[in-house]
Image: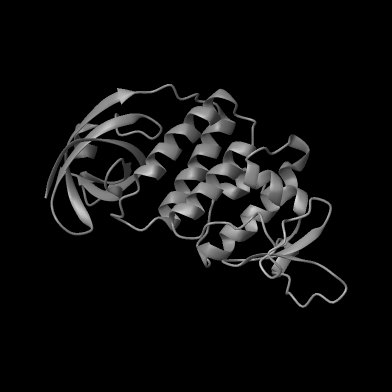
Amino acid sequence: MRVELEPAYILHTRPYRETSLLVYALTQEHGLMHMVCRGARKKGSHQLQPFIKMQLSWTGKGELVTLTKYELEKSSYRNDFRTHIQCFYVHELILALLPKMSPAPELFECYEQTLAEMTAAPLNEAVLRFFEIHLLTIIGHPLQLEYDCHTEQAVLPEAEYLYQPDSGPTLITAGSTGSAQPGGWNRVSGHILRQLHQQELAQQDWPQAKSFLRGLIKYYLDGKPIMTRQLLGAK
């Protein structure tokens, strides 16, 4: 298979053998690709950097292809520490959760929008929360945030719920039988669920939304570590 000049973003690179690089890229039409850029370290290929939209060409079959050409397209990335760490967190999530070579054009579009929003407002944690929701939806775990999954009644903003992965929220009552997850992350207010559904997350609600979504993502990560969480102040 030969692909010519497909829009892409570099998520991560690391040394490969003596002179080459392994390149992990999110591409517009082919999803997450693992590539070898031969001789890149010898040539000093400093252009293979994250957060810059590129055009990549590659050839090969299987899970590891050969990068044959790359061109820079554009960059409006804001290079400050907070934005840098937030973007690397997004990259870690994609690498950990998205299957290789699984076409996901909607994720490419979502990534671009997230990168632009984080560059424009680096302290807005709501941007990360909405990306987390979109990513879970794309990989087959959409969040059910509108209704009690047992009674099918609309979520009440003043009530408390237990959220079960792949099922949804259940109203907490005196006779509730649902189980809390370790750390209690899945106990969440109806107000937070409704805000996440409407994608209108007020700043005072960021901590509870963060705890809820980080716990849910940890469940789906199934033990895979996310290193940037420590730098973002996550527990």
The part of the image, by quadrant, that contains residue 38 is top left
Task: Identify the residue shown where x is 35% and y is 33%.
Answer: 49
Left or right, residue 123 beside residue 102: right
* Residue projecting furthest to the right: 174
Between 132 and 162, the one nearer to me in the picture: 162
Task: Identify the residue shown where x is 45% and y is 39%.
Answer: 110
What x and y, as percent, mark residue 120? 55, 23
The correct choice, above or below, for 35 with respect to 176 in the image is above
Q: Quadrant of the C terminus?
A: bottom right
Between 129 and 94, the one nearer to me in the picture: 129
The part of the image, by quadrant, that contains residue 206 is top right
The correct choice, above or below, for 104 with respect to 172 in the image is above
Snapshot colouring: one colour
What x and y, as percent, mark residue 231? 61, 44
Asked if residue 143 can be seen in this view, the reply is yes
What x and y, as percent, mark residue 43? 19, 33
* Numbered disc total: 0
Task: Identify the residue shown where x is 49% and y is 41%.
Answer: 88
Asked if residue 45 can be seen in this view, the reply is no
Between 215 and 64, the one nearer to me in the picture: 215
What x and y, as percent, mark residue 78? 50, 24
Task: Identify the residue shown where x is 47% and y is 32%.
Answer: 113
The part of the image, by quadrant, that contains residue 177 is bottom right
